[in-house]
Amino acid sequence: MNLQGTEGWLQDRCGHVTASEFASVLAKGQGKMRAAYMRRILVERLTGKPCETYHNFDMERGLIQEPYARLAYQAETGNLVEVVGFIKHQTLMAGCSPDGLIDEDGGAEIKSVIPTVQVETIIAGGYPNEHRAQVQGSLWITGRRWWDFCSFCPDLPERLRLYIFRVARDEAYIKTLEAEVRGFLLEVQTRYDVLMGNDLKVMAA
């Protein structure tokens, strides 16, 4: 198993549509986002090399704090979190990198966030819609029954530092997501075949 963040993990994901970007696949109303992600996957297929991804300060902070968030989640719930790498779909070039698997039926998505985001999440309840595609996508890829969304912010008072919401499978959503991912992958393959066959007129059409 290649741990997340390692070169081996990046290579495992190369050319695959990942759960962290399922929202981009669904973003038909924002064509530029979907198109940009398609180009990235296409380039990875053509080169066999992972494309560099953008990291800002908040993302780097989140990566540093994630182990502490995992420990806080384990202490609060008693659940042992199994750290895993990239889990591939059985037949599609798609997969997910869970923040952890739990027992036989569960998983966890752990976010380390800034105070304003944590407070907003707690007040709203549930879990942020922006993470729905990733969480439900992970449930789809792994076949698991539930997923704990965990939001962690060490800067807040102790009672507000950890927020956990259990997410059940949404079969209707997963069915739609799978159809969209299959369609996206078909588009990627069509463009790949055109480029490798040098029939650029088909691409333009």
Image (cartoon, rainbow, N blue to C red):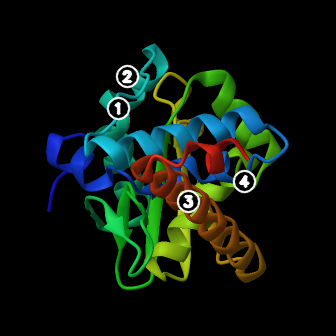
Closer to the chain start, of discs 2 and 3, is: 2
Crowding at mark 2 (Cα within 10 Å: few <14, some 14-19, many 20+): few
The secondary element bearing badge 3 is classed as helix
Query: Could you tell me which residue is drawn at 40 percent across and 50 percent down?
Result: 196
Looking at marks 2 and 4 on the same chain, the residue that comes earlier in the sequence is marked by: 4
- Between residue 36 and residue 149, name the one nearer to us: 36
Q: Would you say the residues marked 1 and 4 are in contact, meaning their CB atoms lie under 8 Å apart?
A: no
Q: Earlier in the sequence, mark 1 or mark 3?
A: 1
Closer to the chain start, of discs 1 and 4, is 4
Q: Amino acid at mark 2?
A: Glu
Disc 2 + disc 4, Cβ < 8 Å:
no
Q: Secondary structure at mark 4?
A: helix
Q: Which mark is residue 146?
A: none
List the residue tagged with mark 2: 60
Residue topped by disc 1:
63
Q: Nearer the viewer, mark 2 or mark 4?
A: 4
Quickly name the residue at label 3: 190
- Res 30 quadrant in image: top right
